[in-house]
Amino acid sequence: EEVEETYVMVKPDGVQRGLVGEIISRFEKKGFLLKGLKLFQCSKELAEEHYKDLKGKTFFPKLIDYITSGPVVCMAWEGVGVVASARKLIGATNPLQAEPGTIRGDLSVQMGRNVVHGSDSPENGKREIALWFKEGEICSWVPVQAPWLRE
Ligand code: DAT
Ligand code: MG
């Protein structure tokens, strides 16, 4: 049971479709700790660095166009097992394969418009939070509900 951090991002389609509150709410209700939050229009360079492992894929240019097409909402979440749990809440990459009850399963239909991102490992969680947030944009705090989430 490791305390981890993950980077979650509402993609431009999620912002345009008015799904920001709904998406933040799912992680809040689960009981994770919000440590960073901002609306942000990212550069091509930042998007390419974020998705550097996918450079060379045929869909890469379209992916970069999509991510830079409008503002995104950047979030840093902390919690025990938060990386894998956030991926479960988000659902499969292809929304048509994502289970009902997941964010992608409930709210999207196409891989190129799958509304939300979540880091795939604790290492990438740290890497992506450092990439998208500046120092001073991350808060460490203890919510009053802490004792009611963990015994
Ligand atoms: P995930 O976002 O579930 O971590 P990923 O890291 O493999 O998935 O890919 C990043 C994004 O790139 C994904 O959310 C949607 C897009 N993508 C991935 N595979 C794709 C494909 N085969 N065709 C089109 N877009 C794809
Ligand atoms: Mg990924």
Image: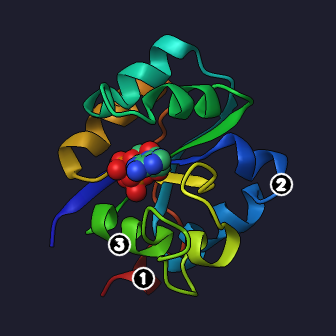
Above or below for 52 versus 39? above
| Disc 2 element | loop
Q: Name the residue rendered at 26%, 56% in the picture.
A: 4
Q: How much space separates mark 2 and mark 1, taking CA atoms?
A: 31 Å
Q: Is residue 7 visible?
A: no
Q: Give the x, y percent position of residue 146.
A: 44, 74
Kind of residue at badge 2 = Arg
Q: Is residue 43 visible?
A: yes
Q: Name the residue rendered at 52%, 34% in the picture.
A: 63
Q: Which mark is residue 149?
A: 1
Q: Is residue 133 left or right of residue 3?
A: right
Q: How is the image coloured?
A: rainbow
Residue at mark 3: C-beta within 8 A of ligand 1: no
Q: How much space separates mark 3 and mark 1, taking CA atoms?
A: 15 Å
Q: 71 or 112: which is nearer to us?
A: 112
Q: Quadrant of the C terminus?
A: bottom left
- Label located before the other in sequence (2 or 1): 2
Q: Name the residue rendered at 64%, 52% in the picture.
A: 113
Please name the residue that numbered disc 2 is placed on.
Answer: 17
| Disc 1 element | helix
Q: Which mark is residue 58?
A: none
Please name the residue that numbered disc 3 is placed on.
Answer: 85
Above or below for 52 versus 8? above
Using a 10 Å C-alpha cutoff, classify the residue at mark 1 as few (fewer than 14 neighbours), some (14 to 19) or many (20 or more).
few
Kind of residue at badge 1 = Leu
The outermost residue toward the left is 1
Q: Name the residue rendered at 63%, 44% in the picture.
A: 11
Above or below for 80 versus 149? above
Q: How much space separates mark 2 and mark 3, taking CA atoms?
A: 24 Å
